[in-house]
Amino acid sequence: MRSSLRTGTTLSHYRVLGPLAAGGMGEVYKAEDTTLGRTIALKILRPDLVRSRERVQRFMQEARSASSLNHPHIVTVHEVGEAVVTPDGDPDAGPPSAVPVLFIAMEYVDGETLAAKIHSGKTDLRTLLGYLTQAAEGLAKAHAAGIVHRDLKPENIMITRDGYAKVLDFGLAKLSELTPSAEDLSAATRAVRSPTREGAVLGTVGYMSPEQVQGKPLDHRSDIFSFGCILFEAATGRRPFEGDSDIDVMHRIMHDKPLPIDQLNPSVPAELRRLIRRCLAKDPERRLQSMKDLAIELADIVSDFDELSPASSSGSSGQSALGAAPARPARGGRIALAIGALGVLALIVAAFLASRRGPAGGREDSQSAFHSMRMTNLTGSGRARGAAISPDGKYVAYVNEEAGKQSLWMRQVATGSDVQVGSPGNPFGGLTFSPDGNYVYYTRNQSPDGRLYSILYRVPALGGEPAKLIFDIDTRVAMSPDGTQLAFVRGYPTENLEAIMVANADGSGERRLATSKRPARFLLTGPAWSPDGKLLAAVAGGPEDDIEFIVTLDVATGEQARVGDRRWLTIEGLAWLPDGTGLVVGGFGAGQRSSGPGAVSPSTEDDQSPQVWLVDYPGGEAHRVTNDLNAYQSISVTADGKSLVTVQRSAYANLWIVPIGAGDNAGRRVTTGRREFIDQIRWCPSGRIVCRAQREGVTELWTFGPDGSDGRRLDVGPNLADPMPTADGQRILFTSGRGGGAAHVWKIDSDGGQATQLTNGPGEALASMDPQGRWFYYRLVGSDGSVWCQALDPGDVPRRVLAGFDILALIVSRSGRQISYLHFESQGDRLEVRVSIAPIDEQGNIEAAVTTFDPHQGIIDGKWGKNDQDFTYLINRDGVANIWVEPKPGDALKPLTHFESGSITSFDYSPDFKQLAIGRGEALGDVVMMSDFR
């Protein structure tokens, strides 16, 4: 076929360098952007596609939306427009074209299509799946932005020469979509022929979803079906739906199942076969619901590919070397609020999936009466952060987060329609419907005079002006059955206590129903009001760190009673059943008490992640509702007790090595598991990297070589946290609950040998260490939060160097002569978070602070730089985390990384300050409704 554009001609400010490809949608040329001096790919669209100006305008709008996507696995669209062709040095080019040409200028990818990779016979399946994992990540980004591709096929996925997959041609298929009322199936056939045939228009018929064949409205699940077709082809070398004609192919898509994959390729792992089957479900409701979930599962298969067996019948992927759930930090009064006030995204992720402790064991009630429960995804973007269902079950309020800002939405369950009822901005929390369903209560940090304080608001369920009710509220509210009162938890850090508060529904008449002074405490989980109005259920904690239990409080007297003997590692949601016979609980168990203070032995009742439970009242016997590797946050139950909503959560973070000064989006990911969560990274003087890593219930201490290779597990156990290498790199200090007891500071040889306990108090957590290895600092857990100093010699007598619960974090400078610490500071009757810098004497004593200042907005973490002047920060801005350096106090911040998406859990400099080790990943959440869960 003769090319429409000759070499040397110009379209707008693009000079054609030569043809690249031609297909059903048009022609692609290699071209030069004469304005910016860069090479681009220039696609012109066939004139017969442009059926009307209205259609062109719709396409332009869609393509411009796609051009706003910025992701490493999506081909960047630079410009979409119309222009006439002009000759440029070509005597045969003729005069300028009088007809405007519709064009797309996009990133030039030097590589080949996925189709070529699949059918060349030179690329193994694991490598192909790696490419498809990357493509799925790009598509998940597009779906999160509300953009559906509509024409996925192997030809629309390019593989660069360095192994990166890039998806192209977003929105092009909409140009030739047909309206069912105007076109019959025969006409549809003419409109969707294969690009290898004469007159091709729209992609390849064999990759269309059933709803696309029928001309029905499409959503992101159509792309999931098409992606399943590509996975099938990668696994077997042939398409899942083939026939003698396009009509025959479309009939097979609508009515037939593909041939069994194990008949075509017996070596395909069972996990991949299961994933493909879920993608190719005819009914979109029975299909895998999220491209992000598909990417996560596919990445797990790639990570564990060598361990998977074709004969395996398991539906889950195998084990990889590292873990996936962040450990739960110690809970304490205002610390969680300070984190929220500072925009600490990575630590929110760390609290977002609570610590997975203990070995995976048997599951009680795994085949119980819950087999009839139905679970329905109400969102699929991965951006949900909280939810509540109305008493009648007709509406669900949920929080949506995008670009670092949260908004409040209301969904009508029957129709799936949404309306925004709270504008984007600071985080929303604690969603609760009034008993009549007319109002939604929520908390939001919008105090003009105190960043640590949240305000309780009430807004009409279908939108309106929010009413401000109560200042300083730390949890969701519980509404009394008659709607006249509300209850919540408030912390009083200056008094070192938490209180269960009761107030009128309009926020007046506050009173303390009960208080709990540390080390015992009421935890910052919202209470629940019993159906008869006489009791409040709440979460309490004892002196031991990270052990919780359920209590009830008499609303009239404040008298407390414990519900059963079960101990929990965390409880993140409570709701009464409407008949008062039990509670729905979101959390996971701590097993049974063993000998010794605070000791907990592993148990078959331990969860791998926070699950949904039913807890009998008053007996306290717990029955599992869910049993999977997701985590569940927030619990809300309908008035009839037949349905509940919760947020299903997942998170991952991999280890990246990033050269300093290497440019935008530079760096290399050196671990790949999508069920891993790597944080608390330290680069040892020896050149190795030490970090904490978690996966499916196991928290481990790992070291890696300077390039991320040669991973070695050093230790495993509960409460494992805070790894810090000594100056010679031969030993590593860390916090651990080794032996099933309370957490203490330990040291271990860098090869994993000879672990030694260094502290022996009621419970201690490592806080910082002298870079010269002379001493370390730790905090007492579950008491007044004092900071103590001790030499590395186990026999050294510890000294208290900072007093008070208001110390949040501290870091010693590289010279060992200064320390910076984050702390609360009283401002009248309010508290503010401040950063202080103080000298350290030769014995490690901390002297009076010489500098105190406000922390930067959005700070997540901080480290001293090369000297005692510069400081490096991990900062979240607009939902994206990057690392910034402040050369001297008061200087303007300068970026060290330029990531355009994702979160960062932790970072550290290499010993020569030429590289960064970074934990980088993403936190996901979607609203799910469980029906018939009892």
Image: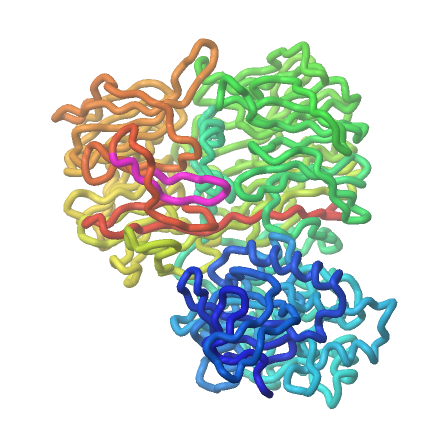
Does the magenta segment cover residue 874?
Answer: yes
Specify the quadrant that holds the C terminus.
Answer: top right
Q: Can residue 309 be seen here?
A: no
Q: How is the image coloured?
A: rainbow
Q: Is residue 335 above or below residue 383?
A: above
Q: Residue furthest right?
A: 181
Residue 441 appears left or right of 891: right
Instruction: Give the x, y percent position of residue 496.
Output: 44, 17
- The residue positioned 29% from the left and 46% from the top of the image is 908
| Quadrant assignment, res 205 | bottom right
Instruction: Give the x, y percent position of residue 175.
Output: 70, 67
Q: Is residue 250 above or below residue 783?
A: below
- The residue positioned 74% from the left and 53% from the top of the image is 374
Q: Can residue 389 be seen here?
A: yes
Residue 660 appears left or right of 647: left
Which residues lie in the magenta part?
A: 873-887
